[in-house]
Amino acid sequence: MNNSLVDYYRCPERYARFAVKTPYPDESGYFRFGESAICYGKCNGARPTAAPVETLHDASFDTGVKDGNLFLPFDLNEVSDNLRYELYANPGLGGDSGLQSAVNRAYYFVRPVLPISVRKHLQKIHLNGWNEMPFPHWPVDRSVDKLHQQILLLSLNAQKVARIPFIWFWPNGTTSAAIITHDVETARGKDFCTTLMDIDDSFGMKASFQVVPERRYKVTPQFLDSITSRGFEIGVQDLNHDGHLYRNKREFMSRAAKINSYGRQWGAEGFRAAVLYRRQEWFDALDFSYDMSVPNVAHLDPQRGGCCTVMPYFLGKLLELPVTTTQDYSLLHILKHYSIDLWKRQIELIMESHGLLSFIVHPDYISGHREQETYKDLLRHLVRLRNENKIWISTPKEVDKWWRQRANLTLVEKDGGWQIEGVGKERASLAYASEKEGCLELTIEPSIAESATAKR
C-alpha cells in the first residue's frame, strides 16, 4: 500500500503507515487532494466525477488518523499509477483512443507527401481549444508530485514527528536535473547533427540523439560513431517514424522485436517513439533501460494526455524519463514563440518540485539563424543554473543510472542518526522533510551538502 511514497522519497517504511478506508467503491473518476493535486481513481466518500471540468471533491477532508496510522479514502499506488500510466485518458486501455482512429491513420499515410503548409493547417485544426483544457494542467502538471507532498506532510502529523529522513532526489545536492535530447527525423536533420553538436559543446553540454533505424535516412556505423566518439549518446527512435507503431498489439510486437535488435546493435539503452505516441501497458516488450516517450502535458501533441509528474518513474523494469517541457517544434512553429519565456516558466515550476528538466530539440527544425539563437538562449539559461549549483546537467543514460542507484539505496539508523548505504552513496545526500507554516519543507543535511536548502 505504501510503496509509492517510499519509492518517491526513498524514506524508511515506518514513516509511511497507511490504510484505506472501507467500504471501497467500484467507480473511478476525478477528485482532488488539497488545492492543486488532481487525482483519478476510486475514492471513498463523495462520488468522483466523470470529467475534470466539474467541481471536484477534496478527498483530503476524508483522511483520518489512528494510532499513528494515516487512513486515506483512496489507494495511493492506484491513483499514482492511473496518472503516470495515463489511464484516465481512456480507462481500461491507457493512452488516447484517437491514436487508433481512421483519421489519424489516414493522416500518417499521406503525411510524407503533404506540404508543410498543409500539415500546419491540419495541426491547427487538431489543436483548436488546446489552451482551454483543464487537465492536465498547462504548462506543467505536478499532480503526482503534489499528491506525494501532501501525503508526506500528513504522515509527519500522523506520527507526531518533527521530521522524516529521505534520500535526496539528485546527486551532490543539486536541486534538479536537466537533459537535452535531439530527435533526428529527416536526412536534413541528420546533416545538421554535426553543427548541433558543435553548439552543444560550445556550452559544455552533451546530449542524446534519437535515430530512426529504417526508411527515413541511411544509418551507417560512421554516422553513429560521429556522435558517440564526441561523447554524445545514441537512442533508438521508433522503427520508421510512420506513426503506426502502436496501431495494434500484433504490429507493435513485430516492430518491437526489430527495434530491440537495433538497440543491441547500436549499444543504445534508451528508446523514444515517433510523435510521442505511446501505450504504456505495452512497454514491457521494449528491451531498453529507459524510455522517453511520455509527455508531462500533451496538449500540443497529436496524442493527448500526460503523466502529470516531473520525476522519473518505473514502468516495470523500464525507467520513464518524461518529457517535461514543450518541444521546440511546438514552441517555434505552433505557438510561434521565438523567446524562451515559456521554457523559463516551465523550468521554474519543475524546479519548485525538484524535477527533471527534459527538452526535445530537433536538428530538423533549428537550422535557421533565428531558431538557433532561441536554442542558444536556452543553453545560456541552463548554464547559469548549473553555475549556481542549482541543476545537474547530464545525459539520459546517466540520469537513468543515477535513478536506479537511488532506488537501491537505503537509510540505516546508526549512532542516533541516519546513514545512506548502497552503491552510489558517495553521491547521495541525506535530506529531511518537515513542516513549516503548514507547508512541507525539504532540507538537505548540512554535513553532506553544505546547508543547501530546498523548499516546496
Image (cartoon, rainbow, N blue to C red):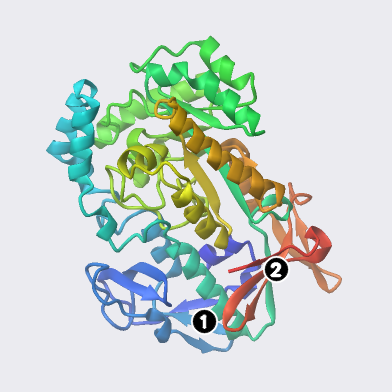
Q: Amino acid at mark 1?
A: Leu
- In the rendered image, the vertical position of residue 374 relative to residue 221, given as above or below: below
Residue at numbered disc 1: 70
Tell me the crowding category of disc 1: few under 14, some 14 to 19, or many 20 or more residues within 10 angstroms, Cα based.
Answer: many
At horizontal 45% and vertical 22% (from top left) the residue drawn is 261
How far across and down, in percent of the image, does residue 208 sit? 54, 31
Residue 443 is marked as 2
Q: Quick check: can you spot residue 288? A: no
At horizontal 64% and vertical 21% (from top left) the residue drawn is 230
How far across and down, in percent of the image, does residue 164 sit? 67, 73
Image position of 60 (left or right of 148):
left
At horizontal 26% and vertical 53% (from top left) the residue drawn is 130
- In the rendered image, the vertical position of residue 187 relative to residue 278, given as above or below: above
Image position of 176 (left or right of 297):
right
Residue 127 is marked as none
Q: Quadrant of residue 206?
A: top right
Q: Quick check: can you spot residue 429? A: yes
Q: Earlier in the sequence, mark 2 or mark 1?
A: 1
